[in-house]
């Protein structure tokens, strides 16, 4: 099963459960199915997270690849010799490029 298929199925289950038109027994079955889908999607996202890299601009304006960090911003300033002590021409420490 693909991630998108699992996510769509999970959304349908949530809609069914929120509607309140499902018996208790069917609700429990849907809940269990939904939890399996949540686990599947979570594992897929972890796999992708490991593969993703971001490209950031350091203080000197050079591009640098850094691993994707799901929770915190990556500080690339420690990887650059900043002899002048400036924060770049515009004062920013790092910039995401899209």
Image: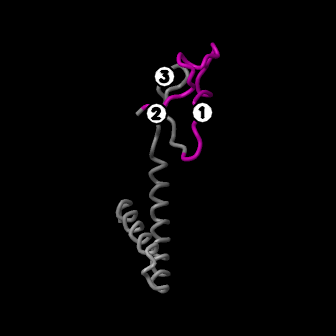
Q: Which residue is mark 1?
A: 75
Q: Which residue is mark 2?
A: 55
Q: Sequence-wise, which precedes: disc 2 or disc 1? A: 2
> Residue at coordinates 44% horizontally, 58% vertically from top-left?
44
Q: Which residue is mark 3?
A: 62
Residue 27: image location, x then y, percent: 47, 80
Residue 20: image location, x then y, percent: 46, 78
Residue 51: image location, x then y, percent: 45, 47
For the residues labelled 1 and 3, say whether their Cβ atoms are less than 8 Å apart: no
For the residue labelled by badge 2, is the local secondary structure a helix, a strand or a loop? strand
Q: Sequence-wise, which precedes: disc 1 or disc 3? A: 3
Count the marks: how many?
3
Q: CA distance from mark 3 to mark 2?
A: 10 Å
Q: Which residues are magenta?
A: 70-97
Crowdedness near tag 3: few (<14), some (14–19) or many (≥20) residues, C-alpha within 10 Å:
few
Does residue 48 show up magenta in the picture? no
For the residue labelled by badge 3, is the local secondary structure a helix, a strand or a loop? loop
> Residue at coordinates 48% horizontally, 66% vertically from top-left?
38
> Residue at coordinates 47% horizontally, 37% vertically from top-left?
54
Q: CA distance from mark 2 to mark 1?
A: 12 Å
For the residues labelled 2 and 1, say whether their Cβ atoms are less than 8 Å apart: no
Specify the quadrant of the image occupied by residue 86.
Answer: top right
Q: Which residue lies most toward the top here?
A: 84
């Amino acid at each position: 099963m693909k991630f998108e298929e699992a996510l769509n199925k999970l959304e349908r289950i949530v809609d069914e459960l929120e509607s309140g038109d499902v018996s208790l027994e069917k609700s429990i079955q849907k809940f269990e199915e939904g939890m399996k889908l949540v686990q599947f999607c979570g594992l897929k996202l972890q796999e992708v997270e490991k593969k993703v890299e971001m490209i950031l601009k350091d203080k000197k304006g050079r591009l640098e690849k850094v691993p994707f960090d799901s929770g915190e911003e990556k500080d690339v300033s420690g990887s650059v010799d900043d002899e002048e002590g400036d924060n770049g021409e515009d004062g920013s420490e790092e910039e995401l490029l899209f």
